[in-house]
Image (cartoon, rainbow, N blue to C red):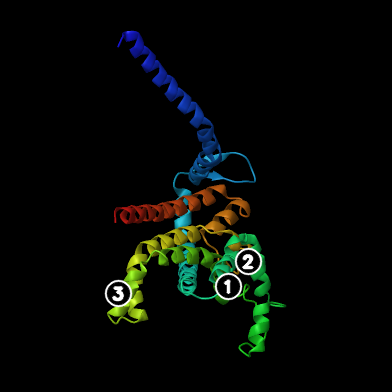
Amino acid sequence: MSKSDDGRQIGSRIEGRTFAVLLVLPGLALLAAVVVYPLVSAMTSAFFEQSLLYPGRTFVGLENLHDVLAGDFWQLLWQTMVFTIGTTILPFVVGFGLALALNTRIRGAKALRGIMLVPWLVPGVVVSFLWMWIFNANYGVLNAILEGVGLIDEPQAWLAQPGTAMAAVVVAKTWQSFPWMMVMLLAGLQTVPPELHEAASVDGAGAVRRFRAVTLPHLRGIVGLVLLLEFIWNFQHFDIIYVLTGGGPAGTTQTFATAVYDTAFHGYDLGRAGALGLLWMVLLMVLVVVYIRFSEKGERA
């Protein structure tokens, strides 16, 4: 092969790489403009005293982070964890129960699967207004039912009482989330070989024992991934909490998501909001690392 041929091949490879870079550049530019720049801007604001009410900012170092940690950070962490755990475990229990039921040979199972998906398809704001009507103290369906069966003597303001507001928000989010859990777990149930159940039945195993010895081992991976994903999503959930309670009453349903929004756009304190968001992002990164490690472990298995 001549030197000129070598030169042409090298030139064509360079041109190919240049063309590939040109193809990727628009996507990278959009990613930088929509994701990277806002993220970096928000994170750097944690180290400045900055307000929405006036221009300019002053570097304050770690002062905002110190103020957040010395303030209501731990209370927000607790409330976020209560909401996150509640809206992860309850949808899982409901979704798993429905998946087990729909995995049997019941009439209309396919139609029921489609109907059960409706709450998941409804936007979060619509779900919030629906449950706001259900929990309404004056004309809510929940109060009417409970008064009708004699469980309460007078209407309750479920969303306005510190003792019930978080539970009400968890119930609303559970109603929206359980269909996704159900679909994922049902898909996992349908991968369990029926021969294993038949062999266990021949050995004298009952339904409970077959569930523990055959079904659960096959679902261990999908259950772990579903719970981790739902936990991460709920840890950063915003819309249902904000529409239903706005973080109230008296901040008892405030989570990191609503606290960052309120601090920035109601308190006009971008520095404190950035510090809170930075700490929140660190916690989310830990959860994401756990999810990635779990996924890699599942792939190797």
Circle 1 residue = 168
Circle 3 residue = 199
Which residue is at the far right? 139
Which residue is at the far bottom? 150
**Residue 193 image point, x, y percent:** 35, 67
Q: CA distance from mark 1 to mark 3?
A: 45 Å
Q: Is residue 60 depicted above or below 111 in this figure? A: above
Q: Which mark is residue 244?
A: 2
**Amino acid on which the number 3 mark rests in the picture:** Ala
**Amino acid on which the number 2 mark rests in the picture:** Leu
Disc 3 packing (10 Å; few <14; some 14–19; many ≥20): few
Q: Are marks 1 and 2 in contact (CB under 8 Å)?
A: yes
**Residue 104 image point, x, y percent:** 46, 74
**Residue 28 image point, x, y percent:** 50, 34
Which residue is at the far left? 203
Question: Mark 3 or mark 2: which comes first in sequence?
Answer: 3
How many numbered marks appear?
3
Q: Is residue 276 left or right of residue 172?
A: left
**Mark 1 element type:** helix
Q: Is residue 226 left or right of residue 216?
A: right
Occupied quadrant, residue 138: bottom right
Q: Is residue 133 depicted above or below 221 in this figure? A: below
**Residue 266 image point, x, y percent:** 63, 55
